[in-house]
Amino acid sequence: MVARARAPQHPQQAGPRAGEGPVRSRVALRVNGRTYALDLDNRVTLLDALRELLDLTGSKKGCDHGQCGACTVLVDGRRANSCLLLAVTLDASEITTVEGLAASDGALSPLQEAFLEYDAFQCGYCTPGQLCSAVGMLREAAAGHPSCVTDAATAADTAHPAALTPEEIAERLSGNLCRCGAYNAITRAVAACAATEAPDQAPRRPRT
Amino acid sequence: MPTPPDGPSALGSPARRSEGHAKVTGAARYAAEHTPPDCAYAWPVPATIVRGRVTSVDIAAATAAPGVIGVLTPYDAPRLGTADDPTLHLLQDLSVPHRGWYVALAVADTPEGARAAAARVRVTYETDPHDVTLSADHPGVYTPAEANGGHPAHRRQGDPDAAFAAAPVRIDRAYAVPPLHNHPMEPHSATAAWDAERHHLTVHDSSQGAGAVRAALAALLNLAEEDITVVSEHVGGGFGSKGTPRPHVVLAAMASRHYGRPVKLALPRAHLPATVGHRAPTLHRIRLGARTDGTLTSLTHEVTTHTSRVREFVEQAAVPARIMYAVPDMRTTHRVVALDVPTPSWMRAPGEAPGMYALESAMDELADALGVDPIELRIRNEPRTEPDSGHPFSSRHLVECLREGAERFGWARCREPRRDGPYLIGSGVAAATYPVLVMPSTARAHARSDGRYLVEVNATDIGTGARTVLAQVAADALRVPLDRVTVAIGHTGLPAAPLAGGSSGTASWGWAVHDACTALTARLERHHGALPPGGLTASADTTQSAKQKSPYSRHAFGAHFAEVRVDTITGEVRVRRMLGVFAAGRILNPLTARSQFTGGMVMGIGMALTEHSTMDPQFGDFTESDLAAYHVPAHADVPAIEAHWIDEHDKHLNPMGSKGIGEIGIVGTAAAVANAFHHATGCRLRELPLTPDRVLAALGSAGP
């Protein structure tokens, strides 16, 4: 047990108040097709901007260190950990969050439908990141990106879409942790969509 | 269950999660996703010594920055009332019982401001010598009165020592499970808003039981429970760590009341190991004595574990041995050492998960020593009644699980280990068990005049599918289609209900929902003509029925099978296949149940292969404190997993005939994997997890 002695009163601190506030910048964030003009503390991450300033709380904070993937969003079509991006660096970038995956009439995307059908989540906290990551991953595969489980001959052939076996899907989504352990169902849901995804809708492989 | 006239029975159907749409669109809001106007942000300051006292807290630099509202310290924080749980007695005195104990709380207008302010708080300490290292022969070791769950710490039947000495076949082994962390994906978070005018506190908390949080806050803040509303509508996992109120919610509420502003506090991931409980490390010694035909004659399971100096928590790891096998002479005992460590607590299947790893490893070793098939050994020792209490089992079916699992897994075909280039491939089996727990609950069912039904109960859905399955229970009792039922949970304004823990949720809440809906059905049958505009309501309280002591021993059972591949060059162990068969009463929703069983097995793979925390002897903290250092299973770690179940009809449980399913999935996994490792390599590792360093050392010394 902790002793419960009444603590003495702390002496009044008379420290100098640093007059300077944090450095701020004006930025126009494009999120799910809408533009938000913001005056931001430069320290604000994209994740915190979405969650705390724009009330787009679909993107989740699981670790704030790029270790769990719950904050995954699409930046200019590519998946990224929004906790590792400073919002002020993203002026004019197109950002898509889980709130932007459904059609404008509210119709769910095939991936969202598949997550429901296969029960590809339990607590749901990693789900927005899994969904955004899967969208980005399907595009990467369609653009011929190899993964570290792709065999060498196939990896060299970037002219064709990568074949998404369950092993490929699991490898490519391994940046998105799910503590409930819904991995099997996520793989099945993504595989169901990979099979129906038209490859010609995929963007070209980035030049980098 | 009566079948509704206009459709198939809702109960037992694979209904999709009722909140699924909200979860896949990002609309489901978790505790930190409510931002009331003028919301402030808090960031706690953890102690940087292991043991001692705070001698000063300098907040000048912290509060100098614009936007900093204040810093609460042990010197000036509001005084709290008495808490049952001393880990919630925050900022009340100067002592530091372990590293990571909170010694200050910075509050600012923005998250960035709060975090920067916390970093600028200067704390000085007086340091005392500390001891954080567990050993079986620690001089401070003692036998507690009870282990977690109210189990007696010590049980003995007959003379296990004499029986062991006389046994022709003996196994005497030590096993170790390291500290483990729950790490739900949603870090513990709360948004608290004190309304001075209404004298009311509203808290959104990531909790497994809003009622328990409200009770704790009322006691600590000297408020009446009616003055507090706690909402836990969507919770991003908990696995036990959100089963009791945690420091974040107390600090958020304290700060909100003190500063007169809503306060949001989301714990940084790296704070969790020291502040929200952990699975305590367990050191096991198991002695099995058997006749040459495999009949067990003696069983001793001794567990040594640690607790903190703040609160005693004893992982009940020797308890499952009391019900597993027919052994006339048995001793199960727990010993504990209070160290200067964070307070351990519940993590998915506390007791059963580490205990069954040790017991089922020892059973595998005995099978090996006897040259008997490990499934056959378990079948030969199947008890007719519970060995500890002598009560008959309400249902058991462990043998059926083992047999069906063997059939589905192709056990007979994989009894020879294989070599494939640098890989060694083997398979293993282990049994699992988890008790049937049930707690009293209340619920209310309401028939609306528009033909729809509302069921209210302060249950919590931490990802189990509780919301969905309670609607199924209600639809069946009301004899209406599932889509006519809405379930409201996760709010202290709803009828009181117990927390989501001990795999007891569905049984406890479901029983009350069943009773309320049955009563409502009876009312509706007596009612003639159109419903009044306000509809009709019926309530239920299962305090009498759920508390009744059962003359039966009630447990779920299961059998786990694993096939592993051991890389002799890198030492990496991969699970190639995993399969579980469970006897867990009536399965109320096969879709969500499969996810629960499978999810438990995934966590078990982590326990077996990668999850490992270290209490640093010098620094007194868990070295692996974040998700980079503490490796929970990722997609690529998890093979195709099969979960199956026995169709079990047990009349001695609850009106639904269900047993809990949230925890048993983890229970046998680690032993099945470890046994498969032994089968593949001929080496036995008796300490989890099976990491490459240990594997290579074992292979090197044995020669694969």
Image (tube, rainbow, N blue to C red):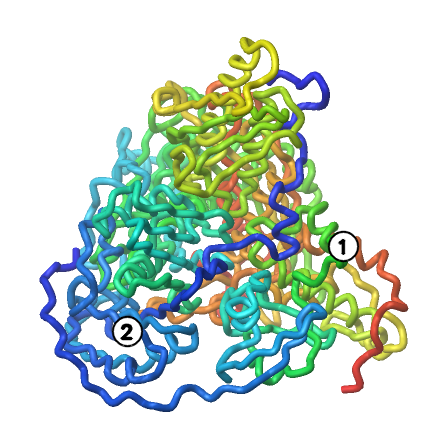
Say the numbered circle drawn on residue B30.
none
Numbered disc 1: secondary structure = loop
Q: Compared with residue A188, is residue B477 higher up or lower down, i.e. above or below?
A: above
In x, y percent, where is residue B483? 66, 32
In x, y percent, where is residue B544? 35, 20
Q: Are labels 1 and 2 on one chain?
A: no
Q: Amino acid at mark 1?
A: Asp
Q: Which residue is mark 1?
A: A105
The front one of B30 and B355 is B30
Residue B640 as seen in the image, left or right of residue B145: right
Q: Quadrant of the N terminus of chain B?
A: top right
In x, y percent, where is residue B141? 20, 53
Q: Which residue is mark 2?
A: B70
Q: Compared with residue B639, is residue B366 higher up or lower down, i.e. above or below?
A: above
Residue B692 as seen in the image, left or right of residue B212: right
Circle 1 packing at 10 Å, graded few (<14), some (14-19), many (20+), is few
Q: Give the quarter of the image for residue B351.
A: top left
Q: Is residue B573 visible?
A: no
Q: Amino acid at mark 2?
A: Gly
Numbered disc 2: secondary structure = strand
Residue ID at (63%, 47%):
B20
Circle 2 packing at 10 Å, graded few (<14), some (14-19), many (20+), is some
Q: How many numbered callouts?
A: 2
In x, y percent, where is residue B361? 47, 47
Residue ID at (67%, 31%):
B13
Q: Give the quarter of the image for residue B265.
A: bottom left
- Distance from disc 1 to disc 2, alpha carbons, whole Å, reads 46 Å
